Image (spheres, rainbow, N blue to C red):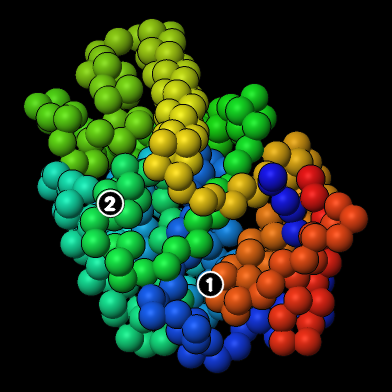
Amino acid sequence: MDVAFSLPKQIRPLLTGNSQLFRQGTQKEKVVVIVGATGTGKSRLSIDLATHFAAEVINSDKMQVYHGLDITTNKITEEERGGVPHHLLGSIHPDSDFSAGNFCAMASVSLKSILSRGKLPIIVGGSNSFIEALADSNFRSKYECCYLWVDVAMPVLHSFVSDRVDKMVERGMVEELRDFFNPNADYSRGIRRAIGVSELDRYFRIESFRDEVTRSRVLAEAIDMIKKNTSKLARRQLEKINRLRRLKGWQVHRIDATEVFRKRGGEAEAEAAWEDLVAGPGAVLVSEFLYSLQPLVCGGVKEMRGTGELMATAPH
């Protein structure tokens, strides 16, 4: 059963407690993992949780690990990070081939470093193959995980992704890729596998000698292909999450953010919806995970009690 939670504002400060609570009652260290299709708000949720629970973020997006192309790969900005430390974000040479095995090795180092400082590690990103490889290693023998899945109905997400590509173009994606363009580049390696790089190849090859009408048409076709390929990526990511739940038995908490995206354009309404439907539920689920709150189900309403506090939650 999918359950949505709303965490009252007056309770939230009580949840940012001593980091030693992360280790009470278990021999394993605790880790939060946030998954979801591209564009669903995973990074935003990771920042919300990190500021509540004294956490640091480990990026698991296979294109965002590379240095460069910040607009094209949609990396979270310094301002958006809100001072939360990030690991494996923009730190790998763009021409390197960073494999799932590389991710497991470097993520393990980051996990140990974060935990040694008494902080909660939050792994977040759309590359489920990296998460799967990590979970299939000796990771499970060392760590206890809480998996959060930020989900958005596909028709709504496709519309958002299309608009997001337009905004990326406005922010300078084409100029960023033009500076990066190499006519002899191998698009099967490194950051050049990112959506947007190969799609704009033809445009950069013809823009210096074709007329304006032709240039505009080719550019529009490239941008449309970027939108289509991003939507295809989102569908593949969703299929992978469902496969991991079905075949590998991952216990994943689904948080439905669809209504948040339906309210975009109305900033106040969208912010309130995010707080009620995504940030609040995420905080309650992580609190239950960290502090061993015990859920009670009464009359169709799920409640959680812990340390004398009562947090009411409602199904959706």
- The residue at the point 15 percent across, 36 percent down is 189
Q: Residues within 10 Å of mark 2 (few under 14, many from 20)?
A: few
* Horizontal relation, residue 218 to residue 52: left or right: left
The residue carrying mark 2 is 136
Above or below 266: residue 32: below
Farthest-out residue, right: 299
Residue 255, visible in the rendered structure:
yes
**Kind of element beneath mark 2:** helix
Say how many tags the image has.
Answer: 2
Above or below 67: residue 1: above
The residue carrying mark 1 is 50
Q: Amino acid at mark 1?
A: Ala
* Horizontal relation, residue 166 to residue 10: left or right: left
* Horizontal relation, residue 80 to residue 280: left or right: left
Name the residue nearer the viewer: 17 or 275: 17
Q: Position of residue 132 (x, y in %)?
A: 33, 47
Q: Position of residue 136 (x, y in %)?
A: 28, 51
- Quadrant in which the N terminus is drawn: top right
- The residue at the point 43 percent across, 28 percent down is 236
Q: Which of the 4 quarters of the picture holds residue 205?
A: top left
Q: Position of residue 4 (x, y in %)?
A: 74, 53
